[in-house]
Amino acid sequence: MRTPPHNPRQSADLQKEIAKADRRRIDQWHAAMRRDGRVVLRTNLVKTFAMALICWLFVGAIILMFVVTPASTWNPMSPGFGGWPVFFLLAVFAIGLALFGVGALLWTFVFPFVRPQLVISRWGVESSRWRPGGRLSQFATPWSGVVDIGGEFERRKYPLPDALFVTITARGATAHQSALIGKPRKPEKVTYRVSRELKAKPRDVLVFLREVHVAHTAHR
């Protein structure tokens, strides 16, 4: 696995996120780990339905725009053609309609039922989702196989907010990953992105995972 080039700006953004971590919540997770041996981070259904609502609002607004805009405006063969800038603008809205439409379907009919969750235990880390018949493990690794707990800070264009993605890098020989078809190959290292649909904030999850990883590494 090639090491990505150092990005000072991303490192600074990541450190700012880490500094805003909720220490009280992290301490509660540590207490739960000592008491129960594990912490289960479940799907944030409020966020799921909020994202679904936002997507449906965008879908409705774009459809309304197409309904009130005369078809001749974006038809190059029509005398009322509004010009190529208008045509390309409407093409962008059409692409947006497709993207927000897919998002609306996923947030409404997929995420509320698959319910991704992350289990952090004394053994290691496991991410799973629901399927008919029970939960399916998507990624799992013991602490002994974890190489790095990292964060990727992604700057997005308006109106999307910037996002922090928590990553878990483990040795391929010790990590489990589910595959849609056949058996997944075993690379030297495997990097997994923790779902952002969990109730917990990514910065809190990042700090907690790092602290638990350090604690288990120190006792090896």
Image (cartoon, rainbow, N blue to C red):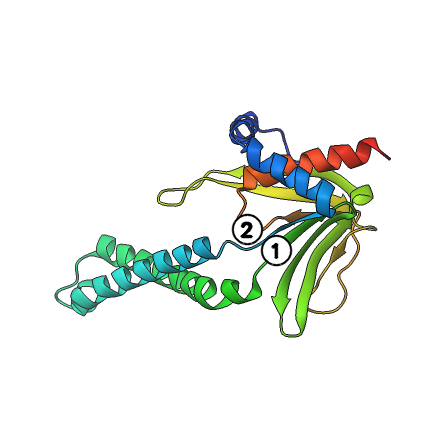
Which residue is farthest front? 35
Task: Kindly identify which residue carries mark 1.
Answer: 117
Residue lying at 41% horizontally and 42% vertically, measured from the top left: 161
> Residue 220 at what x, y percent from top left?
86, 35
Badge 1 vs badge 2, beta-carbon distance below 8 Å: yes
> Residue 46 at what x, y percent from top left?
44, 55
1 or 2: tag closer to the N-terminus: 1
Residue lying at 50% horizontally and 53% vertically, measured from the top left: 44
The quarter holding residue 53 reads bottom left
Residue lying at 62% horizontally and 29% vertically, measured from the top left: 6
Q: Which mark is residue 15?
A: none
Up/down of 142 relative to 83, above or below: above
Q: Amino acid at mark 2?
A: Leu
Up/down of 45 relative to 113, above or below: above
Residue lying at 80% horizontally and 44% vertically, measured from the top left: 145
Under circle 2, the secondary element is loop
> Residue 77 at what x, y percent from top left?
20, 69
Task: Kindly identify which residue carries mark 2.
Answer: 198
- Residue 27 vs residue 17, the one in the foreground: 27
The quarter holding residue 215 reads top right
The answer to whether 209 appears left or right of 109 in the picture is right
Q: Amino acid at mark 1?
A: Gln
Q: Disc 1 versus disc 2: distance between alpha carbons?
A: 7 Å
The answer to whether 66 appears left or right of 14 in the picture is left
The residue carrying pointer 2 sits among few (fewer than 14), some (14 to 19) or many (20 or more) residues within 10 Å by Cα, namely many
